[in-house]
Image: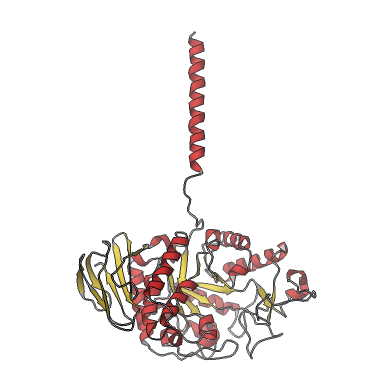
Amino acid sequence: MALDLLRVITFLSLVLVSTLLQADDTMSKYQPKPYVELTHPEWSKKATIYEVNVRQYTKEGTFNAFAKHLPRLKELGADILWLMPIHPIGELNRKGEMGSYYAVKDYMKVNPEFGTLEDLKSLVKQAHDMGMYVILDWVANHSAWDNPLTKSHPHWYTRDHKGDFQPTPWWDWDDIIDFDYNQPDMRKYMTEALVYWVKEANIDGYRADVAGFIPTDFWDNVRAELDAVKPVFMLAEWDARDLHKKAFDMTYAWDLHDALEEVAQGHSDAAGVYQHFADSLSAWPDNAIKMNFVDNHDKNSWEDTMFARFDKHLDMSIVLTVMAEGMPLIYSGQEAGLDRSLAFFDKDLIEWKPHPIGDLYKSLFALKRENQALWNGDWGGKMIPVPNSNPKSILSFARQKNQDKVFAVFNFSDTEQSATFDETIQLGQYVEYFTKQSLMIKADSKIFVPAYGYKIFVKP
């Protein structure tokens, strides 16, 4: 009798355990999981990024000449130095006298115009010694017509309807030809080349040119192989959430740039910028870093200067790119007030001089470093909308992380504007960052902002 009772108890216990396990299994499929699975390198948590046009940076156009600017860039607040492509440039079907950086003749060599491999290593070491990091611009989608791979592995390239090498279809890039990522041995070569520069030159990651033209699973594998060498930072020239899952730390905030430019050109207002953030911050996964900018080499070379595109809205747009979620970018020469489009295929030396834009970036980057609310990804604070009484002219939001908080107010109109605010997160004691004036913001406080202006309130 006792034995039978024991058997019954054992059976019921097993049934109960099985039921609980099944319940756990059922619920597990409903548990939310972070979309971003990669780990950002620790050093990127409050980083800024600076795009280096080596050719136009100095009269010599070399790594060694550029290295002399490192102390200035450190003082500016630049953390990640993105070097535009450093490889030899193709000669067949070259554009201009010097050609495009993005027509790569050899992925395993350094452009002799810039110096030697040892010069590149020296530049990277100097940057590291100053607490900065270096990423290389990588052109994986296509090569120059005279890249040796066209002879040794012609099957690695796509073909047109006649069976000939072809530029990337539908684009006017007639100085390059398109790779075929259906070839496994081609993928292996490109991955090994990417790993080579991390191992050999100790670089810290890559900016991937037209990353979305290349299958995402290629980049997913690349990231895993690079991280096996050292933690890297990856920037994609693209704007797609799937790239953030396993491959890229950061993608371009093209839509933010365009939203700001639309206002500057009179086609929109503050409500349009608000709508951008409403869409973007709802659609993009947490911990996916966006690169915010008012200029880069494509915008400067092909769509006029930052002054022409943003006019009186320029300073305000710069401030917003640093205050908003994301990592701010400076392109070579912006800090010197670059007021012309640099030639892309020929020598066109940047004129270096002090400029208020450089001072503005320096001040903003200092705030970003010291205020955790402005850090990148999950290290920083989410943008919280603060509705106001003047939404067509005024954009207002707050960001908070731990003990740090900022409340940002921007006037997108051509006259002074004021607004009251219908939220609670903005309430409290602040110091306006640029004027250093103290202010208690209350429920009925009205803030006045000059034309094309901004006020950044920082919790003391």
At 78% from the left and 74% from the top, the residue drawn is: 161
Q: Is residue 192 left or right of residue 300?
A: right
Question: Which quadrant of the rendered structure holds the C terminus?
Answer: bottom left
Front-lying residue, 460 or 201 = 460
Give the image's coloring scheme: secondary structure
On the image, the x and y values in percent for residue 16 come to 48, 27
Q: Is residue 29 left or right of residue 324?
A: right
On the image, the x and y values in percent for residue 299 come to 51, 81
Front-lying residue, 158 or 261 = 261
On the image, the x and y values in percent for residue 195 come to 61, 66
At 32% from the left and 62% from the top, the residue drawn is: 400
User: Number of marks in the image?
Assistant: 0
Height in image: 400 above or below 344?
A: above
Q: Is residue 460 left or right of residue 332?
A: left
On the image, the x and y values in percent for residue 397 come to 33, 67
Q: Is residue 172 left or right of residue 427?
A: right
Front-lying residue, 454 or 7 = 454
At 54% from the left and 85% from the top, the residue drawn is: 301
Front-lying residue, 436 or 54 = 436
Q: Locate residue 260: give its quadrant.
A: bottom left
Residue farthest right in this picture: 162
Q: Locate residue 276: give its quadrant.
A: bottom left
